[in-house]
Image (cartoon, helix red, strand yellow):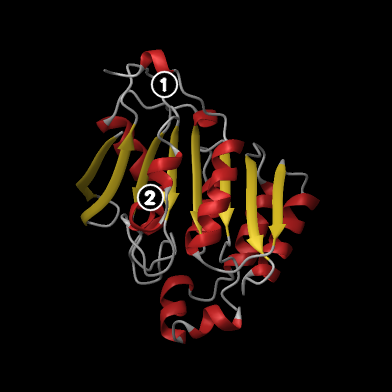
């Protein structure tokens, strides 16, 4: 795999941003792309530093793109920082500009995240038509959750969402979406976000989404996100052709 940390200028944010990219060393083109979104307190380096993702994809024909949203919840904030636009709309265009061997096809573009990133993956996947597969691990869908709400004061949440209820926003978008993507979700029973995950997936099931929802024992930590990331990768339509690996 080729590993790159890229600094680029985001027009949506009017500032420099960083992302980490992992590319398979292959002569193939039309390579599938997985966008991995971090959680609260994380960055573009979180997945590489804290997970086993590099080992998991070493035999897959799959590129990884890991951007940063700081603490902005993959949202166009009320204070004028357009993180949703930067990651959902602008970033895929830049990726295909920089790496022409990566696929632009919806069915070969995937998005996955954990916690805040799980919310971001579902939001970006539903509000755009760029991703054929969405995966969420312990998605932070409900900011009214007591534990989640205690992590930041009211000014923070108002600055991000204003009076918007992000859970209801996702439900309303999902209800009216015509081209439904495939969705995978996991949440552990001991996770403080479990109830919100159950509720969100029940809504998606009611809207007849093609959904795989795994519930197991587990809490809100990397041990479980690593474990179920393997399931995500098995679920995605990716493979590897050894004879086309670059020597």
At which x and y percent is residue 218? 63, 65
State how many labels appear: 2
Residue 126 appears anywhere in the view: no
Which mark is first along the chain, 1 or 2? 1
Query: Which label sits on residue 87?
Result: 2
* Residue at x-position 57% and y-position 39%: 133
State the SS at label 2.
helix
At x 68%, y 64%, the residue is 217
Label 2 and label 1: CA atoms lie apart by: 21 Å
Q: Is residue 227 visible?
A: yes
Of residues 75 and 223, the one nearer the viewer is 223
Of the 4 image quadrants, the one containing the C terminus is: top left
Which class describes the residues within 10 Å of circle 1: few (<14), some (14-19), or many (20+)? some
Q: Which mark is residue 210?
A: none
| Residue tagged 1 | 30
Residue 30, relative to residue 194: is it above or below?
above
Question: Split into 4 quadrants, where in the image is the N terminus?
Answer: top left
Where's residue 184, x and y in %? 64, 47
Q: How many other residues sit within 10 Å of disc 2, few (<14), some (14-19) or many (≥20)?
A: many
Q: Quadrant of residue 168?
A: bottom right
């Amino acid at each position: 795999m080729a590993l790159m940390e890229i600094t680029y200028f985001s027009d949506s944010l009017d500032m420099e941003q960083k992302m980490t990219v992992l590319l398979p060393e292959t002569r193939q083109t039309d390579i599938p792309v997985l966008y991995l979104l971090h959680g609260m307190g994380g960055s573009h380096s979180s997945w590489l530093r804290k997970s086993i993702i590099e080992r998991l994809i070493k035999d897959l024909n799959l590129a990884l793109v890991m951007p940063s949203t700081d603490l902005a919840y993959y949202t166009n904030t009320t204070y004028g920082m357009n993180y949703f636009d930067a990651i959902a709309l602008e970033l895929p265009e830049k990726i295909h500009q920089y790496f022409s061997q990566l696929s632009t096809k919806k069915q070969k573009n995937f998005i996955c995240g954990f916690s805040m990133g799980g919310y971001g993956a579902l939001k970006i996947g539903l509000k755009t038509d760029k991703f054929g597969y969405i995966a969420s691990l312990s998605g932070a869908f409900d900011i009214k959750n007591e534990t989640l709400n205690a992590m930041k004061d009211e000014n923070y949440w108002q600055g991000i969402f204003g009076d918007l209820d992000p859970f209801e926003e996702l439900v309303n978008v999902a209800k009216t979406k015509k081209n439904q993507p495939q969705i995978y979700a996991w949440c552990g029973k001991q996770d403080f976000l479990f109830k919100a995950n159950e509720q969100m997936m029940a809504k998606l099931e009611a809207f007849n989404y093609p959904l795989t929802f795994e519930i197991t024992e587990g809490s809100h930590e990397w041990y479980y996100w690593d474990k179920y990331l393997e399931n995500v990768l098995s679920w995605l339509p990716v493979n590897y052709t050894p004879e086309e690996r670059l020597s």
